[in-house]
Image: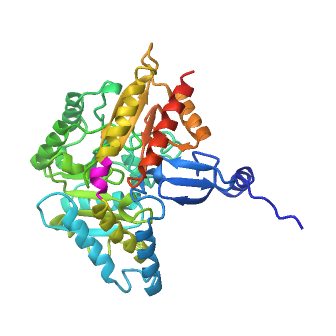
Amino acid sequence: MLTQVTTNASLQARKNAACAQGIGTLTPHFTARAENAELWDVEGRRFVDFASGIATLATGHRHPRIVAAVRAQLDDFHHTCFHVTPYEEYVALCEQLNRLVPGPSAKKSALFTTGAEAVENAMKVARAATGRSGVVAFSGAFHGRTFMGMALTGKVAPYKAGFGPMPGDVWHVPFPAAPLGVTVDDSIAALDRLFKTDVDPQRVAAIVIELVQGEGGFYVAPPELMEHLRAECDRHGILLVVDEIQTGFGRTGKLFALEHYGIEADLVTTAKSLAGGFPLSALTGRAEHMDATRVGSLGGTYAGNPLAVAAALETMRVIEDEGLVARARMLGEQLTACLSALRTEVPRICDVRGLGAMVAVEFRDPHSGEPDAEFTKRVHAAGLERGLLLLTCGVHGNVVRFLFPLTIPEAVFEEGLGLLADSVRAANV
């Protein structure tokens, strides 16, 4: 009797028949196994992973210490619901986050499951702490696919299109981005105009910002903007909420991107690499704000799952023991040098930017200056053809972002850079 062979094509057909159309996938390759910064599909094809689950794997696929920590926790218990019978590990992780999140204020934390949940609960805390309803976010932002997450997100397609009215009292101002023609002064002026013409700042509970926009194109918030936002929040009694879901845990060459700015946020959301790829998120903030909500108003059945918490505690140790924050800076410098060298060959490269290992390259038509999404797609396809997993982003879809594991072996990283250079050159033909 012949055994049916599993192929990418057969699995794609099953996916199309069984899974909702709205669940998109970037490649037609189905994963069979992965190790650190390498991944193999069901047909045995190997890929160098420069995506790492959209920044969830700073410590790589299946880090042996994290796997061991999860197995050890599994031997004790894998779920009780913290609301029913609490456990020490949840408390220990909150203590750790309270110590690590930048700023001198006394802090408290709450654990959740997804980044969107952390953002939702940040809005709940901000509204409870201030007694206000308004929220200000930025164009190009991504804060999740829940309704409040969509409302805060500054990109319509594919996140908002077709889903009807968003929650009210959410306002957007432009995020500074030189390739988009938006300066820091433009952003500051837009916020000032918003407060004069559309919403009373005394009605605003929070200003929410990513320090490096993820889905928006890896534009980096200038220090002048963050200083202005901190001053405006202090002036009007608004909470400054920093979304570190993608930037956190070493990605930008600091444990948190906030450390580049020397200011303190009122609330900080984290997820992704917090637990080495296990589903876990957190909200950490000034203790007086975090305690503004009623008992029982925060949490969730799976929030702070013991296996994910065990992974997170070990992830924190791995990041420190293996010097991954410093390694992020080194890897980012190597990648930036590679991309900068390509600019002489490929005039469509209009910008190379980022913090630490959170780097992006933007492509535009060299004659018209218009965003070149088609060229970006060709780079992505050429990478896939050569065995390199890349991610695209940007409001115009003309940016490639790099989110490789910070544990990537040097030889694999060099191989990936070579594949990247070949892919960009191939797309340029």
Q: Residue furthest top?
A: 367
Q: Is residue 205 visible?
A: no
**Looking at the picture, how far across and down is residue 326, in whole percent?**
27, 51
From the viewer's perspective, is 108 left or right of 394? Answer: left
Q: Is residue 312 visible?
A: yes
Q: Residue furthest front?
A: 411
From the viewer's perspective, is 41 left or right of 146? Answer: right
From the viewer's perspective, is 133 left or right of 343? Answer: left
What secondary structure characterizes most of the magenta part? helix
Is 194 inside the magenta-drawn segment? no
**Looking at the picture, how far across and down is residue 348, in whole percent?**
45, 22
Q: Quadrant of the N terminus?
A: bottom right
Q: Nearer the viewer, residue 270 or 424?
A: 424
Image: 79 above or below 262: below
| Numbered-mark total | 0
From the viewer's perspective, is 14 left or right of 81? Answer: right
Residue segment shown in magenta? 323-328
Q: Nearer the viewer, residue 127 or 108?
A: 108
Q: Quadrant of residue 413?
A: top left
